[in-house]
Image: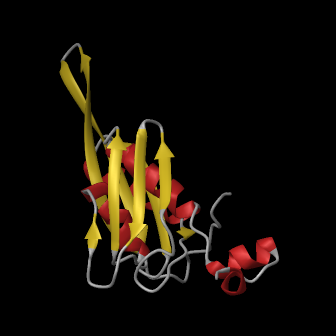
Amino acid sequence: MAMKYVNVSELPLEETVVKIYRCSKVVRGGRRFSFGALVAVGDRGGHVGMGYGKANEVPAAVEKAMKAARRAVVVATLTGTTIPHEVHGRFGASHIKLVPASAGTGVIACSPVRAVLELAGIRDVLSKATGSTNPKNLVKATFDALAQIRSRESVESRRGVSLAAAVK
């Protein structure tokens, strides 16, 4: 199920540059460089987005990526400072496993995943990245994992049962 996109005009979003990529092409006069920027934005309250932009200069690439990230802000379901249940996300050959943690644990994750989780407002979570550790794919896999998180209320309404009564 896809995540719900939101209007971000009223949200105070913070930006984080996850990675800057330098690409070069060989021309007759030598090498010509261009840059790509991977950016994550979030309000540390459940709204998070990511974007990728390319340009001939780093500031222009970052600006394009920020615009793309602001257009792609989604809502993440949180339970206090952690996630409600364990989830597995995947994109390409990158796999990410997110496990809820007790208060005070912190975000145990690699830097691309940490940037997304902290901007989403998740302060206590354990993670394990397997497969490819390409930052672009890890960030997209993290978004896939966040899309799979369901709250207790949404599961109860979809199933038409009360989970508290079912657990004995």
Residue at image location 30% in from the left, 64% down from the top: 114
Q: Position of residue 139 (x, y in %)?
A: 40, 53
Residue at image location 29% in from the left, 59% down from the top: 17
Would you say residue 72 is visible in this rendering?
Answer: no
Q: How many marks?
A: 0
Q: Position of residue 43 (x, y in %)?
A: 43, 79
Q: Position of residue 137 (x, y in %)?
A: 41, 44
Name the residue furthest right.
Answer: 160
Residue at image location 42% in from the left, 78% down from the top: 82
Q: Is residue 98 left or right of residue 159?
A: left
Front in this rendered view, residue 95 or 22:
95
Q: Is residue 88 left or right of residue 152?
A: left
Name the residue furthest left.
Answer: 30
Q: Position of residue 58 (x, y in %)?
A: 26, 49
Q: Which picture quadrant has residue 136?
A: top left
Q: Is residue 30 left or right of residue 65?
A: left
Colour scheme of the rendered structure: secondary structure
Which quadrant, please, contains the C terminus? bottom right
Residue at image location 24% in from the left, 18% down from the top: 26
Would you say residue 164 is visible in this rendering?
Answer: yes
Which quadrant, please, contains the N terminus? bottom right
Q: Which picture quadrant has residue 162?
A: bottom right
Front in this rendered view, residue 74 or 153:
153
